[in-house]
Amino acid sequence: MIRISAFKWVPPFAQGVVRDLRVRWALEEAGMPYEARLIDPEVQASADYRELQPFGQVPVFEEEGLALFESGAIVFHIASRSDVLLPRDEAGRARAITWMFAALNSIEIRVQQLAEIDLFAPDKEWAKLHRPDVEKAVRRRLKELAVWLGDREYLEGRFTAGDLLMTTVLRILRHTDLLDSEPTLKAYKERCEARPAFQRALAAQMKPFESHGA
């Protein structure tokens, strides 16, 4: 049985965007059953966990003696076993992988920088001075992505792991109204989020948080 690590609880601003969601979604799309190992800060800091994840983050993926970390790498590992997430033809597969890297390297780096300012340092003077430039960079990337998407339903004509990762990156902007200025991207994100596999993954991640608050 596949096992992934996830947090028992995170603050509300992080609920629904913790990166184990990506792995849960990929597993749901691929039809691969899994169980979650819910961890707390004590486990996160333990030597045993650091043997699996050197930086103490989630998720960790474990299956039959194989342990992987980094959500993008785990999604790729899962996708390589699923026609739903990666096309069979060589060119289609290569294009989907390109979009996986684009989501994490070209888009998330900018988006995460803005989120860190807004969520962790909004009142710091350096953040107030730096934020306009960061937002400008995010808007530029979103515009470029929207131009590429155009009237396509998905990034490469069909849903792939590239769309999965891109959607989870765009979700990081939920505390802003930046996607409202790019209705093409907003509709794209909502279309991907409407997939049953995503809904199951999100519900699974949220369940422990809801129980914690009960």
Image (cartoon, rainbow, N blue to C red):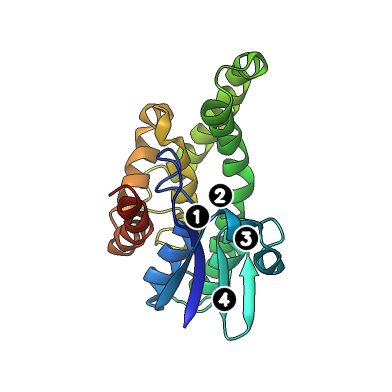
Residue 84 appears anywhere in the view = no
Query: Is residue 11 placed above or below 125 in the rendered structure?
Result: below
| Among the two numbered marks 1 and 2 on one chain, the one whose residue lies closer to the N terminus | 2
- 170 left or right of 67? left
| Among the two numbered marks 1 and 3 on one chain, the one whose residue lies closer to the N terminus | 3
| Residue position marked by numbered label 1 in the rendering | 165
Give the class, few, some or many, for how many residues have Cα within 10 Å of label 2's Cα (few <14, many ≥20): many
Separation (CA) of disc 2 from disc 3? 14 Å
Does dot 3 land on a helix, a strand or a loop?
loop
Amino acid at the residue labelled 2: Ala
Return the residue nearer the eye: 45 or 147: 45
Q: Tell me, for residue 62, which label it has, or none.
A: 4
Q: Quadrant of residue 45?
A: bottom right
Residue drawn at the location 63% of the way across and 19% of the way down: 127
Residues marked 4 and 2 touching at CB (< 8 Å): no
* Residue 196 coordinates in the image, percent (x, y): 27, 62
Give the class, few, some or many, for how many residues have Cα within 10 Å of label 3's Cα (few <14, many ≥20): some
Give the class, few, some or many, for how many residues have Cα within 10 Å of label 4's Cα (few <14, many ≥20): some
| Residue position marked by numbered label 2 in the rendering | 103
Return the residue nearer the eye: 6 or 33: 6
Residue 27 appears anywhere in the view = yes
Residues marked 3 and 4 touching at CB (< 8 Å): no
Separation (CA) of disc 3 from disc 4? 12 Å
Q: Residue furthest bottom?
A: 64
Query: Is residue 90 placed above or below 190 in the rendered structure?
Result: below
